[in-house]
Image (spheres, rainbow, N blue to C red):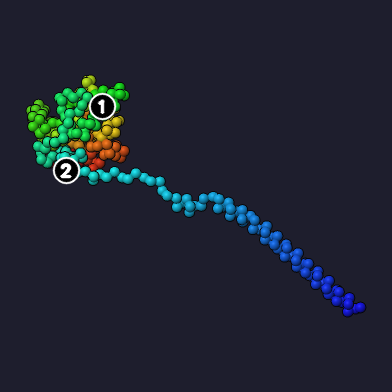
Amino acid sequence: MLAVASHRSHNSLVMVASMTLTAVVGLVLVACSSSTTPDSASNASVRASPSASALASAPPTPTAPAFDRTLLSLDDPNSLWVISNKHRPLNPVDFAPTDLSMPVGVPNEFTQPLREAAARAVETMYTDAVAQGVNFGIISAYRDYGTQVSLYSRYVARDGQEAADTYSARPGHSEHQTGLAVDFDDGGACYLNACFESTAAGQWLAANAADYGFVLRYPNGQDAITGFTYEPWHFRYVGVGAAQALRDSGTLTLEQFFGLEPAPGYL
């Protein structure tokens, strides 16, 4: 009897220990399950949000390529970008364009042509200006070498060479000889006068000419660079790309835009 009781007691203890161990394991499993749930939620939240590395690896927004200022020659008189100033005579000095064309439908005081591209651009610009209630016409466009000889000599005889050199180019240095320069006027009281800047035509041209390929060639206060006094009526054709690039860069003169030295006086 005692042995049987002892055996039964031993079995009971084993059963109790087994049940206790089972309960403990269960509690551990529950605890582990509870402790991992917040981490899982947190990880899911992190996965749902873009990481810093993902944002950093996003492709950059494309930017427009820089304007190529070396695309055309600054020396070839046939180039739309040729620069003629007091340091840079045309070569040859008696250069004459071969693609001159008369602007059609634009008032033209002396019936002077321009190079083909410039003539077509003036036509479009004039048509758009008139549609917006602004009128102007051409005072002067292409002038050949002989005409510039006569004109400059007349100015020297009247005002002396020093004064003439501030507003008239010597033969072989004139932008008008390139066939790419044009002087405008509105028929008012500011004919070849600085007050043209305040006219409707002067303001429209200053604001819009770049969109047609023209730049104001001799800006106010830049005579130490260009060599000539302010001429709000004198525009130079360089093509839409170059004209807009110059405007958007905030650069005032072609010399600065193309990295050329100032040309305040003749060499």
Q: Residue at x 16, y 35 (%)?
A: 99
Does residue 232 appear in the picture of this structure?
no
How crowded is the residue under tag 1: few (<14 C-alpha within 10 Å), some, or many (20+)?
many
Does residue 11 appear in the picture of this structure?
yes
Q: Nearer the viewer, residue 3 or 257?
A: 3
Q: Residue furthest top?
A: 188
Q: Nearer the viewer, residue 91 or 254?
A: 91
Q: Nearer the viewer, residue 11 or 90?
A: 11
Is the C-beta separation of discs 1 and 2 under 8 Å?
no
**Split into 4 quadrants, where in the image is the C terminus?**
top left
The numbered mark at residue 75 is 2
Which residue is labeled 1 in the image?
126
Q: Residue at x 75, y 68 (%)?
A: 21
Q: Amino acid at mark 1?
A: Tyr
Position of 58 relative to 212 (above/below): below
Label 1: state its secondary structure: helix
Q: Earlier in the sequence, mark 1 or mark 2?
A: 2
Q: Quadrant of residue 224?
A: top left
Q: Quadrant of residue 142?
A: top left
Q: Residue at x 64, y 56 (%)?
A: 37
- Residue 26 position, x and y percent, is 73, 63
Position of 74 relative to 143 (above/below): below
Q: Residue at x 70, y 63 (%)?
A: 28
